[in-house]
Amino acid sequence: MKLVIGSDHGGFALKENIKGYLQEQGIEFTDYGTMTPERCDYPVIAKKVAEAVADGTFDRGILICGTGIGVGIAANKVHGIRAALCHDCFSAEYSRRHNDANILTMGERVIGPGLAREIVKIWLDTPFDGGRHAVRVGMINEMDK
C-alpha cells in the first residue's frame, strides 16, 4: 500500500508520532508536510494529500489538524475522496468496511497518541466489505462530479 500523510501546525506533533508508528511497523509513507510546527494553512496540505490519493499516486492518506475537521472538509472537496474523521476504533473500522474511506482524518487536540496509533492500525488493516456498500460508495462518487 502506498500511503501519504500530512498535517498543519495543529496536528504536527501527532503526525510525527504516527510517522514513528508507521516506521516501527515497516509501513512506507510519504510526508507532504508541514515539516515544522510553525503556523500554516491546512487547506493547502489537505488539497495536496487529497489530490495525490485521487489521482492514484497513493492508495490512501492520513491528515491531521487540531480537530481533524478542517482537513476533512478540505480533502472532501476533491473528486473521489472519501475522508473520514475518526476519533474511535469503531468509526475507523466502519469508515473502511462500509464507506471505503481513502483518507483518515484525526485531531491532535481531541485524541492522544496511543488511541491515534490504534485507530491508524485498524484503519490500515480493515478491508472494504463491498457488496451493497459498493453501490452506496458509487452513489457518493457520482455526487461530487
Image (cartoon, rainbow, N blue to C red):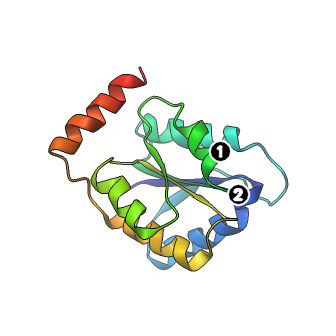
- Quadrant of the rendering where the N terminus is positioned: bottom left
Residue that protrudes farthest toward the top in the picture? 145
Q: Position of residue 134 (x, y in %)?
A: 22, 40
Question: Rounded to the nearest whole Å, what is the CA distance between mark 2 and mark 1?
Answer: 8 Å
Tell me if residue 32 comes above or below residue 75 in the rendering. Answer: below
User: Can residue 25 be seen from the camera position used here?
Assistant: yes
Residue placed at 30% from the left, 63% from the top?
126
Q: Residues within 10 Å of mark 2 (few under 14, many from 20)?
A: many
Which residue occupies the extreme left position in the image? 131
Front-most of residues 111 and 26: 111
127 with respect to 7 (left or right) = left
Please tell me whether mark 1 sits on a helix, a strand or a loop.
Answer: helix
x, y (%) of residue 26? 44, 74
Residue located beneath label 2 in the image:
66
Side of 120 relative to 132 (left or right): right
Closer to us: 129 or 87: 87
From the viewer's perspective, tell me whether residue 27 is left or right of residue 8: left
Disc 2 residue type (three-letter): Gly
In x, y percent, where is residue 144? Answer: 43, 24
Q: Is residue 86 above or below residue 75?
A: below
Q: Secondary structure at mark 2?
A: loop
| Closer to the camera in the image, 94 or 53 | 94
* Residue 48 appears in the figure: no
- Count of numbered circles in the view: 2
Location of residue 114 in the rendering, given as x and y in whole percent from the top left corner: 56, 79
Is 13 left, or right, of 101 in this rendering? right
Tag on residue 139? none
Which amino acid type is marked by label 1? Gly
Verify CB contact (< 8 Å) between mark 2 and mark 1: yes
- Residue 70 is marked as 1
Q: Quadrant of the C terminus?
A: top left
